[in-house]
């Protein structure tokens, strides 16, 4: 009896067993259709055995095993298992989350997979067969087998040329266990690269160091200031590996950063097959790209966090650009960190990984300081004339401003216009204004489903919740006291845009935020407009803050940075510092010296002082010291158990109950459990949320505890309408 153990997209952490008389170990990693309840589901075979976990009579028979797609490599299956274990998420959901959705559609893939070359290899059992075991009259059979004995392998073009019956004969050999069929990796492509830039001394050093250790697991932290040419380091290291026919995985935080990086790689390596994988693709594009990577046809794989699950038969290098970025962590479902998984994959494949940033995460920086990662630094901008911009704070307590734009900023913008240079006005809030307020009774428009204020979108006269997406027309009068004098309070990108249009009626102003790039082609059009110099003033959110290289941009103005200075989130400062360094780094990247003006009411705050000096290292060291004394990561390890229910008391009560059962879980003595508290954003999409923080001094203790505790929580009687999840290494609390 042969049983396959299948991962299915269901919220239970186990595999499902099916009878599959014809299956064997070569089917591990293949897609299979199986009956489940009264449905048919697609799943992935994770193992094959003759030991069912339920009595045989209860087993159903599996449907078709998809032979068209090469099975998922063992390394990817191991990654899924690690993920399921580490993030305490059902294995089937982990596997199916990592695969293109269309793979689950029956029969869909067969017609669409890239052309593959089939080859047959001799098995150990086949090797001990001699020609005399094959009857002399079966001439072709002997001929075929002697070729196999000679070479150990036979490819399609050869066996096809031999006889029209070879394929049938090879299948006979397979049934006897003498040979195995596999998908050949495609033939070599002609590698070429266009002339590279002559690297700076620092770049050359970084490239040489990384290349000296290819073929071994080496985690590198490439800490290079903004504009130092980290991309060039990636490209030149990649060139070396591509020349050896290796595959390269490049992860970027934002889907919006993929087109330009893709263009850069394509331009440098014009013949190298490249696929780009991100959430902007439709499902068949995604499947195509994924299959090309999986079959080894694509040598450069570029993508956002989900791309970390791309199978690669010949991995050579992983690059994580802007490694500090929070979007590498998935915030729902399987809450994985693509950056951390990238390090896992590099170790697994025994290859180097380069984590690049101008402002590394404190976690990675700490790893580099204690020697777990190797640190490479680029201290100077790559273009020799380019220097870091001068940063100044504008003390808003004493400076007059109109519509949130202070006089020094208006002056600087005017000057920039006169000199025909580009400017960026950075305000991290989209919409017209973040609140609608009644002047007489102080009523504020709030979302009914979330603990949030509704944002005014004046253009379509709407109030929108940026958390749940709810929208409604702007009320003509205050619903509480009837006063018609209600007004937008505070500033968002749209309002600043209007104010700038008033101030500079002749300037070409472009707003770039999530609302303005909603249309599929809008983003590319905007980038082109900026690069062609058809814009004078950009008004934008963090979409423009990182990664971009606009050579004509000389002035950056930051309007509302203070809002995250005194947040309760222990990572808020780190995040703000990094964001401001990034946005400041957009200025003066080429031949024009840059200036950065920051409006603040706290010009003496250590964060701004460090920012003016642009001294990441000093700032990071102070932050790390604070983290250490306050027992925060990277000095401790955290997990959060979150619960949501229609009523807050229910969520809290559930968490209390889990806290009680925690005391009997393994390793509890080494764990600190905090009291359950309402979440910072208590109400979201109509549900009340609470959380319980778990802290441990070692990852190992935390994991042992979580595994046991998680099982115990799962075993609790289910409560209707209460949902919970565990977030390991949470980014926000
Ligand atoms: N060796 C070099 N010689 C000349 N120009 C270079 C060299 N290396 C990089 N550049 C140029 O320097 C500019 C900045 O490079 P790049 O965008 O890679 O910086 P970065 O380190 O990624 O910065 P950021 O962190 O701000 O994104 C680009 O215009 C790039 O073409
Ligand atoms: Zn809402």
Image (cartoon, rainbow, N blue to C red):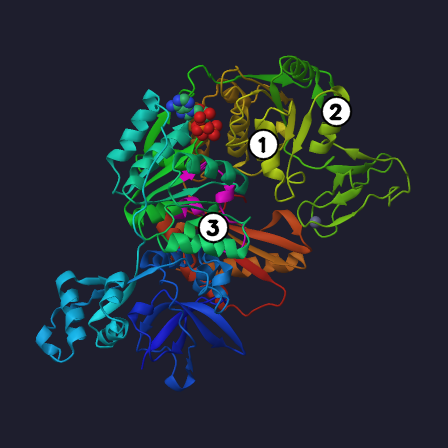
Q: Does the CB distance between marks 3 and 1 fall below 8 Å?
A: no
Q: Which mark is residue 119?
A: none
Q: Is residue 99 magenta?
A: no
Q: Which residue is mark 3?
A: 306
Q: Does the CB distance between marks 1 and 2 fall below 8 Å?
A: no
User: Between disc 2 and disc 3, whose residue precedes?
Assistant: 3
Q: Is residue 338 magenta?
A: yes
CA distance separating discs 1 and 2 = 22 Å
Q: Nearer the viewer, mark 3 or mark 1?
A: 1
Residue 138 % position (x, y): 16, 78
Q: Is residue 724 visible?
A: yes
Q: Which residue is mark 1?
A: 528
Determine whether the beta carbon of the residue marked 3 sits less than 8 angstroms from the nearest atom of ligand 1. no
Element under disc 3: helix
Q: Nearer the viewer, mark 2 or mark 3?
A: 2
Residue 646 % position (x, y): 67, 59
Q: Which residue is mark 2?
A: 501
Seen in the image, is 672 located left or right of residue 595? left
CA distance separating discs 2 and 3 = 40 Å
Element under disc 1: helix
Residue shown at the point (44%, 58%) measured from the top left? 88
User: Between disc 1 and disc 2, whose residue precedes?
Assistant: 2
Element under disc 2: helix
User: Between disc 3 and disc 1, whose residue precedes?
Assistant: 3
Q: Which residues are magenta?
A: 320-341
């Amino acid at each position: 009896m042969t049983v396959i153990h299948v991962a299915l997209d269901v919220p239970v952490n186990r595999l499902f067993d099916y009878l599959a008389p014809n299956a064997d170990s070569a089917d591990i990693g293949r897609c299979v259709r199986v009956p489940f309840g009264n449905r048919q589901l697609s799943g992935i075979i994770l193992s094959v055995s003759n030991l069912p976990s339920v009595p045989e009579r209860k087993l159903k028979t599996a449907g078709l095993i998809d032979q068209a797609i090469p099975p998922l490599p063992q390394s990817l299956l191991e990654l899924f298992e690690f993920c399921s274990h580490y993030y305490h998420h059902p294995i089937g959901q982990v596997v199916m989350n990592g695969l293109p959705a269309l793979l689950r559609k029956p029969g869909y893939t067969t017609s669409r997979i890239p052309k593959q070359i089939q080859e047959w290899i001799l098995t150990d059992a086949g090797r001990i067969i001699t020609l005399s075991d094959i009857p002399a009259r079966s001439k072709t059979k002997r001929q075929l087998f002697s070729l196999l004995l000679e070479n150990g392998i036979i490819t399609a073009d050869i066996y096809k040329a031999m006889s029209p019956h070879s394929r049938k004969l090879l299948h006979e050999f397979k049934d006897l266990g003498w040979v195995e069929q596999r998908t050949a990796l495609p033939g070599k492509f002609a590698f070429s690269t266009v002339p590279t830039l002559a690297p700076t001394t620092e770049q050359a050093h970084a490239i040489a160091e990384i290349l000296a250790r290819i073929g071994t697991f080496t985690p590198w932290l490439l800490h290079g200031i903004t504009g130092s040419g980290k991309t060039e380091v990636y490209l030149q290291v990649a060139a070396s590996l591509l020349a050896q026919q290796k595959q390269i995985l490049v992860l970027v935080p934002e889907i919006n950063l993929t087109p330009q990086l893709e263009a850069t790689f394509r331009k440098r390596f014009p013949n190298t097959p490249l696929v780009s994988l991100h959430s902007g693709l439709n499902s068949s594009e995604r499947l195509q790209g994924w299959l090309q990577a999986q079959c080894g046809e694509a040598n450069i794989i570029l993508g956002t966090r989900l791309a970390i699950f791309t199978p690669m038969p010949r991995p050579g290098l992983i690059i994580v650009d802007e490694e500090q970025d929070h979007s590498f962590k998935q915030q729902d479902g399987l809450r994985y960190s693509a950056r951390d998984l990238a390090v896992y994959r590099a170790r697994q494949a025994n290859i180097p990984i380069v984590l690049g940033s101008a402002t590394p995460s404190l976690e990675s920086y700490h790893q580099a300081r204690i020697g777990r990662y190797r640190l490479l630094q680029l201290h100077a901008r790559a273009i020799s004339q380019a220097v870091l911009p001068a940063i100044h704070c504008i003390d808003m307590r004493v400076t007059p401003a109109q519509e949130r734009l202070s006089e020094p900023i208006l002056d600087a913008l005017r000057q920039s216009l006169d000199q025909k240079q580009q400017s960026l006005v950075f305000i991290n809030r989209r919409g017209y204004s973040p609140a609608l307020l009644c002047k007489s009774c102080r009523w504020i428009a709030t979302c009914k489903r979330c603990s949030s204020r509704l944002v005014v979108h004046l253009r379509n006269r709407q109030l929108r919740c940026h958390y749940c997406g709810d929208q409604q027309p702007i009320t003509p009068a205050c619903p509480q006291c009837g006063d018609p004098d209600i007004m937008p309070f505070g500033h968002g990108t749209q309002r600043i845009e209007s104010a700038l249009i008033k101030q500079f009626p002749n300037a070409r102003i472009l707003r770039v935020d999530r609302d303005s790039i909603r249309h599929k082609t809008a983003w590319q059009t905007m980038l082109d407009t900026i690069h062609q110099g058809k814009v004078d003033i950009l008004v934008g959110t963090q979409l423009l803050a990182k990664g971009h290289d606009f050579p004509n941009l000389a002035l950056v103005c930051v309007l509302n940075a203070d809002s995250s200075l005194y947040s309760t989130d222990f990572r808020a400062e780190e995040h703000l510092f990094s964001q401001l360094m990034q946005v400041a780094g957009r200025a003066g990247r080429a031949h024009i010296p840059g200036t950065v003006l920051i409006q603040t009411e706290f010009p003496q705050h250590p964060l701004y002082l460090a920012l003016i000096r642009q001294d990441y290292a000093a700032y990071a060291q102070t932050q790390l010291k604070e983290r250490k004394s306050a027992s925060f990561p990277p000095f401790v390890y955290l997990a959060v158990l979150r619960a949501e229910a229609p009523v807050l008391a229910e969520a809290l009560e559930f968490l209390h109950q889990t806290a009680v059962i925690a005391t009997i879980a393994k390793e509890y003595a080494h764990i600190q459990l905090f009291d359950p508290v309402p979440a910072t954003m208590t109400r979201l999409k109509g549900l009340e949320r609470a959380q319980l923080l778990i802290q441990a001094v070692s990852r190992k203790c935390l994991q042992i505890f979580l595994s046991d505790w998680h099982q115990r929580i799962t075993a609790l009687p289910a409560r209707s309408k209460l949902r919970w999840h565990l977030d390991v290494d949470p980014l926000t609390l």
